[in-house]
Amino acid sequence: MLNLKKVINASGRMSILGVSTMSDYVLEGIARGGRHYFKMEELVQESGQQVAKYVHTEHALITNSASAAISLAVAGVISKDDRYLVEHLYEDAFLQREILIMKGHQVDYGAPVDVMIHVGGGKPKGIGYANGCSIDQIDQSVSENTAAILFVQSHHCVQKNMPSLQEVSEWARQKNLPLIVDAAAEEDITGYGELADLVIFSGSKAIQGPTSGILAGKTELIKYATLHMKGIGRAMKVGKEAIFGLLHALEQFVTEKTDVSHQLADLDKLKQLNEWSGIKITIEADEAGREIYRGRVHIGAEAPLDASTLVNQLKDGIPAIYTRDYHANEGHFDIDPRPLLPGDMDIIVQKISNLIGGG
Ligand SMILES: *Cc1c(COP(=O)(O)O)cnc(C)c1O
C-alpha cells in the first residue's frame, strides 16, 4: 500500500486534496460503467443528451475535466466543422483564433485559464486592466480574427468594476460572437443555458461526481467540440466509468436537496472551543449566498499562538487538518463542514484545544 498521511479536509472542494468524496450511488455508477462494453459514440451522444436536460441546454458533452472542456470549447469555435483544422489545429496559416478574456478573469485556478485556451488552439486577448473592464473596452478589442469571448464566473476573479455576465451576454448576442462561460465551481448549474452559448462545469466540485467535466450549450457548438475527440480531445479522453459516475452524481445533485442539518450539528461541536480564552467561534453564511455555513475561528491576542501559526500546525499534524485559511493573517480562519467525514469535527476540536488550551 501507499504510505500517505491521513487528511481531514475542512477547507472546501480543493483540488490539492482530491476535490470531493463520492457517494455510494456515484461509486455504483462508476462500477456499472466499468463492468460493461458500449458503443462509445452512442454513449457520448446519449449521455450528452441526458446532461443537457440537467443543465437546461440544447446539448452537452462529458469531458475528463472542466479544463478539458475549456480547451475543447475553444478548439470547436475555432475549427467549426472544418475537419482539416481538427487534425491541424495549431497550423500558423489560420488566424481566426483570438479568444477575448477580461484581464480580471485571467486567473490561476490551480492552472492558468490562458493555458487551456492555448491548448485549444486559441490566443487569449486580455481586455481592460487587472482591476476593471468596461463593455466599451470589450467592444473595441474585437477584430476580424476574434473567434469567441470567454467569461470566467468564479470567486477567483476580480469582482469589482467588471461587467456582469448578463451585460456581456447581451453584448455578445449583438455582436453574434460565441460566449463561453467557465462556471466550473458554481452550484447553480441550470442558470447559464439562457445566457451562454457554451458553459463549463467541473464534475467533481459542486456536483461531487468523479473527476470529469461538462461542456454544455448550443447543439452546433457541442458538435464542433465533439469533432476534436479525434484531435486534441484524444489526450483528454473521458472513460465510460466516469460518464456513468457523473450521470449518477447529477441525478443525486438535482433530486436531493442538500441537507445542512449535519453541517449545523458539526458546527455546534465547534462552539465548544469558546471555553478557551483567546478563541471565539462564529457561524458565517456563505459570502456568495449559497446554502453553506462555515464555522469561523477568531484567534485573539490572549491566545498562545496566532491564527497563521495555528493553521500551519494543524496542517503539519497527524492527521493533517486543512482549514479555509485565506484570512489567517487577519486573525481568523474557517472550518467548512461540508467535506468532513463522521468523527472529523471531534478530532478538529481536540487538536485545536491541544494547541491553544494545552488541554
Ligand atoms: C476548478 C476550476 C477549473 C478547473 O476544473 P477541473 O475540473 O479541475 O479541470 C476551471 N475554472 C475554474 C474557475 C475553476 O474553479
Image (cartoon, rainbow, N blue to C red):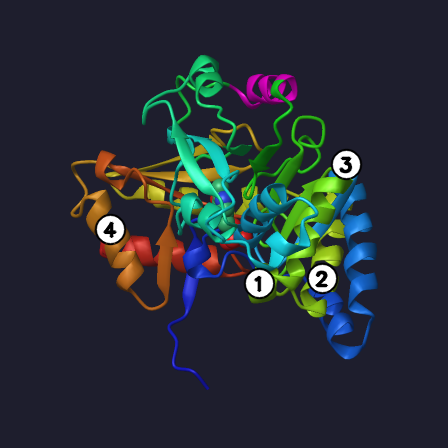
Question: Circle 3 sits on which residue?
Answer: 56
Seen in the picture, residue 131 relative to 113 is either above or below; the reply is: above
User: Which residue corresponds to the image point at 37% horizontal and 30% vertical from the top-left?
Assistant: 103
Q: Is residue 79 visible?
A: yes
Dividing the picture into quarters, in which one does residue 188 lie?
A: top right
User: Which residue corresponds to the image point at 20% horizontal and 50% vertical from the top-left?
Assistant: 309
Question: Circle 2 sits on which residue?
Answer: 243
Q: Nearer the viewer, residue 99 or 128?
A: 99
Measured in 3D between alpha carbons, the distance from the residue under mark 4 to the one under mark 1, in whole angstroms, is 40 Å
Question: Circle 4 sits on which residue?
Answer: 310
Give the foreground label among 3 and 1.
1
Give the mark nearest the N terminus, 3 or 1: 3
| Circle 3: element type | loop
Measured in 3D between alpha carbons, the distance from the residue under mark 2 to the one under mark 3, in whole angstroms, is 18 Å
Quarter of the image with the C terminus in it: bottom left
Magenta extent: 164-174
Measured in 3D between alpha carbons, the distance from the residue under mark 4 to the one under mark 3, in whole angstroms, is 45 Å
Residue 257: give its label: none
Give the mark nearest the N terminus, 1 or 2: 1
Give the mark nearest the N terminus, 4 or 3: 3
Residue 236: give its label: 1
Amino acid, disc 2: Ile
Measured in 3D between alpha carbons, the distance from the residue under mark 1 to the one under mark 2, in whole angstroms, is 13 Å
Amino acid, disc 4: Leu
Mark 3 and mark 1 in contact? Answer it, CB < 8 Å. no
Crowd tier of the residue under label 2, counting other residues whose Cα lies within 10 Å: few below 14, some 14–19, many 20 or above: many
Amino acid, disc 1: Met
Give the mark nearest the N terminus, 2 or 3: 3
Give the foreground label among 4 and 1.
1
Q: Is residue 118 located in the magenta-colored stretch of the structure?
A: no
